[in-house]
Image (spheres, helix red, strand yellow):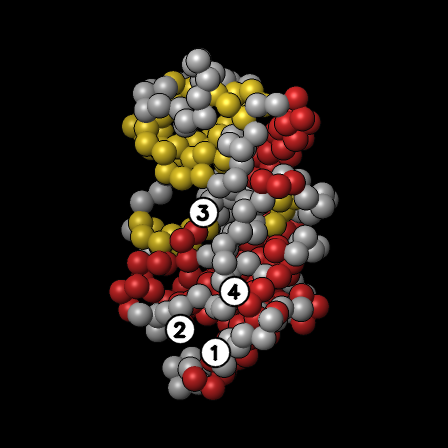
Amino acid sequence: MASRLPLQPGFILKGYTLGEVLGGGGFSLVYLASSELSRGKFVIKEFCPQDIVYRHSDGSLSPNTALAESSFRHGLERFKSEAERMSKIRHSNLIGVNEYFEANNTLYMVMNHEEGRDLRWFISKMGGNLDWDLLQRVFPPIGNGLQQMHQLGIVHLDVKPANVLLRTSGQPLLLDFGAAQTLDSDKPFGDFQTLTHGFAPPEQYLDGQLGVWTDIYGLSATIYNCITGTPPTPALKRKKGESLEKITVTRAKEYPYTLLKTVESALSINESERPEDMQSFLSMAFGASGASSGDRST
């Protein structure tokens, strides 16, 4: 009997016991898990493009049509490439891939599970208006982590408040690389790509060229949300003429002008008008604290 449901709690994968489903995008499912060899909790991401596969009773996946076979195999290879690259990243402000392995005719990534609250909680509690000191503690380290990703040829493509966790220690952590792509491929996951309205620039909607400028937009949109309490107007609506709050005017008394001006520039619907790389963005937005955020690798 075949099913498209996630793997059930209690299913064992290479010594990990799966728990609840934490979420998933167009091509993956994410599970909470525990290990027989450790008391810690883990997050396991499964390559599972749900629109083109079905699951057998033993847990394995198969493409649901002959035409889906090619898309599934291509996506699986790209997912493996992402896992290989992400496993090389060691940065204290990026969730790391501990290991990856093949099982059930698909691929799994294993990451540590971290405790804390994401930025949505703080934005909701404060109605935006997150103070300058907090922004300085959160965004230069996250931006520095993204810079390291970019140097390895990877873009995150889903930077948003839900994916920025403040650990119980107060240190920020960028989560969820489910949408990440390598820069050396036009559309690694084809139709499986996901995006978040308000935080995705026009090129993610319009099959445009993705790059570091795409993450710069997402990070800027996240800062904008922290300041105003609302996400930016979705990019396609802006292309049709809807406006964006002019934060250099409305928020001038609460935040440095250089931050506000840089965020506005980085939210341009024209990628050529955004800062050229993440380090330039951080230096422009946060000055010395951004430029000296350093490599926080572990």
- Closest to the camera, between mark 1 and mark 4, is 4
Mark 1 or mark 4: which comes first in sequence? Answer: 4
State the residue position of label 4. Answer: 234
State the residue position of label 2. Answer: 228
Query: Is 50 situated above or below 117?
Result: above
Q: Are marks 2 and 4 in contact (CB under 8 Å)?
A: no
Quarter of the image for residue 200 reads: bottom right
Mark 3 or mark 2: which comes first in sequence? Answer: 3
In-front residue for pair 62/156? 62
Residue depicted at 39% across the width and 32% down the height: 31
State the residue position of label 1. Answer: 245
Label 2, residues with CA under 10 Å away: few <14, some 14-19, many ≥20: some
Q: Amino acid at mark 2?
A: Thr
Mark 4 or mark 3: which comes first in sequence? Answer: 3
Q: Amino acid at mark 4?
A: Pro
Q: Amino acid at mark 3?
A: Leu
Residue depicted at 40% across the width and 73% down the height: 228
Q: Amino acid at mark 1?
A: Glu
- Distance in Å between CA atoms under marks 2 and 4: 15 Å
State the residue position of label 3. Answer: 175
- Closest to the camera, between mark 3 and mark 2, is 2
Residue depicted at 40% across the width and 68% down the height: 230
In-front residue for pair 18/207? 207
